[in-house]
Amino acid sequence: MEKALQETLLELGFSPNDAAVYLAIVQLGPCNAGPIIQATNLHRNIVYNSIQHLEVRKLVAEKVVKGRKIFSATAPETLAQEFEQKAEMAQQLSQKMKELSEKVSEEIVIYQGPKEYISLLSGLLEAMPAGSVEYIFGTSNGRLMSKYIKSFNKTYSEKLGKAKSKVRIIAFEKDKEELEKNLKHLPSRYEVRYLKYDLPDPRVLDVYPDLNIVLHNIYSEDGRSVTAIKIVNKVYTQECLELCKRLWEMAS
């Protein structure tokens, strides 16, 4: 049993010497350094160093009786309390590190060609949690968006059908007829609203709020190729999300 206890202490981060001294003090009860040295077979200086470590951790208490130092183990619950406090500190630190990581996390990657693009979309689709909402603003004119929809391969189309996230497309009224012909190829998770304004058609802006990702998609004039600029940035994603939410409310 003693060996098992010592191994457990080692797993909890005790040094071999500290574990041996702590276990000896618990077993011996209040005593001076002599019995501890004898029980552990450690050098006197090593024993005193370990006692100091344990006192700092409040696992061992010291008192003077008739001019001699007597050492005793504190309540066993002290050990559990120490690790509960450390677990709480680790949790708080983990959250702070996550927040810090999100602040500095930024990535810009360019994907070119249909294969890279569909691979990118497929990965993002799998990463989207159930119930999340993706926003798409603009269609780079309905004709090109239609070619894009038709370019979906069978594997990606199957993933679209199984996905549990939603997609809201904000398009322009002038592209409605062309888009409606092809939206029937997409699953019901797609919703579309149209803006009536006669504005220059932007390239497609694709916002993934839960992933902190924004895609800028640029289609070639013949619709056969596409370049996607992926931006990973929490602040920028939130700004784009707010824009899309407002446009969604304005559209019909």
Image (spheres, rainbow, N blue to C red):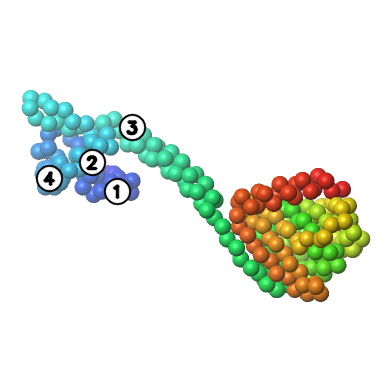
Quickly name the residue at label 2: 53
Of callouts 3 and 4, the N-terminal one: 4
The kind of secondary structure element at disc 4 is: helix
Disc assigned to residue 45: 4
Query: Above or below — where is 25 with respect to 210?
Result: above
Quickly name the residue at label 1: 10
Of callouts 4 and 2, the N-terminal one: 4
Of callouts 1 and 3, the N-terminal one: 1
In the image shown, does 239 or 101 lie closer to the viewer? 239
Name the residue: 15% across, 46% down: 46
User: Considering the image in quadrants, where does the N terminus appear?
Assistant: top left
Judge from the rendering whether residue 165 lies leftward or rightward of residue 40; answer left or right: right
The kind of secondary structure element at disc 1 is: helix
Name the residue: 38% across, 40% down: 86
How packed is label 4: few (under 14 Cα within 10 Å), some, or many (20 or more)? Answer: few
Count of numbered badges drawn on the protein:
4
- Mark 3 to mark 2: distance in Å? 18 Å
